[in-house]
Amino acid sequence: MKYYIGKDGKTLGPFTESEIEEKLRSGEISPNDLCVASGGTEWQPLSKVLPDLVAARSIAQPVLAASKPKKRRWGMILGILGAVIVVVLAVGGILGFFAYRNMFPKDSQEDLPDQVKAFKLKNRYPGHGDIWGSKAWYAGMYSVPPSEDFLLYLMDIYKSETVAKDELEKGLAKDCTSGDTPLRFSFTKDGKEIAEGATCYRGFYVHKGNRVATVSKSGDSISIDDMARFMENLPFIEGSKMVAKK
């Protein structure tokens, strides 16, 4: 049997019961809309004409409604997980960037200049550092052309001045293997000490702030005075005078 539906002053249909059920589910019609069987004359609310169909639809609705929050919860959970993953990747990317920058610092003219007085940079070694940024170091070989003798220069940059001083003393302890007392000296400028140094004659150490420079030589043509002039004119203490401490 087919039925007509009266809605908003219009007559719709005829529809089968299955078609009416579908339209109820989609919201096109409601149980309160008027309905009449094909060939009939008495219009009544759909809920009275097809009570079993409307009742079945009313029972199904809560089940569908109850399932929606679950979908929303899963959507929320997936959204939160997605946001967490994005944050983790972003943080990981930032940490990776800083770790890479710490391990491979940019070249520094202050810490590894191209020329110091007559000495010219012969070999520049790439800067290195630890992943945490607590230490970075630069190294290079300097010579006065055409001589093949050279100075080996190493600049260590630490996180703090205290650590720099400790590392200087450790270096001295290794150099003074025969129990020698290290010779200590100052680098002065305008009558003030701007840096300090020490040696056990294997290598000279220059300390200022969180920096420790180490200078050693290879070859007989380079004198101690040449090494002193080199150290006195390093960019971070340029124009200083090396004076032995009493």
Image: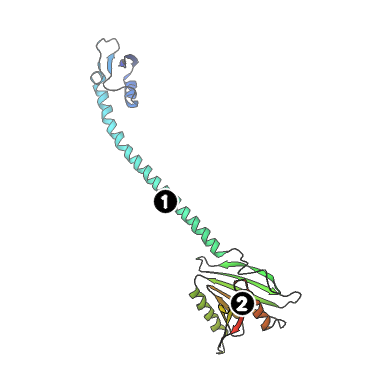
Is residue 27 shown left or right of residue 177? left
Judging depth in this view, the residue of 153 and 53 nearest the camera is 153
Can you name the residue that lies furthest to the right here? 146
Q: Quadrant of the C terminus?
A: bottom right
How many residues crowd around disc 1 within 10 Å: few (fewer than 14), some, or many (20 or more)? few
Identity, as a three-letter code, of the amino acid under mark 1 = Val
Q: Quadrant of residue 120?
A: bottom right
Q: Quadrant of residue 181?
A: bottom right
Q: Quadrant of residue 222?
A: bottom right
- Position of residue 122 measured from the top left corner of the image (x, y, whole percent): 70, 71
Q: Is residue 46 visible?
A: yes
Against 225, is 61 above or below? above
Against 85, is 155 above or below? below
Identify the disc placed on residue 84.
Answer: 1
Residue where numbered disc 2 is placed: 240
Q: Secondary structure at mark 1?
A: helix
- Position of residue 235 measured from the top left corner of the image (x, y, whole percent): 62, 71
Judging depth in this view, the residue of 105 and 7 nearest the camera is 105
Identity, as a three-letter code, of the amino acid under mark 2 = Ser
Q: Secondary structure at mark 2?
A: loop
For the residues carrying marks 2 and 1, which lies nearer the camera in this image?
2
In the image, what residue occupies the spot 61% across and 81% down?
Answer: 242
Is residue 155 shown left or right of residue 144? left
- Position of residue 111 measured from the top left corner of the image (x, y, whole percent): 60, 69
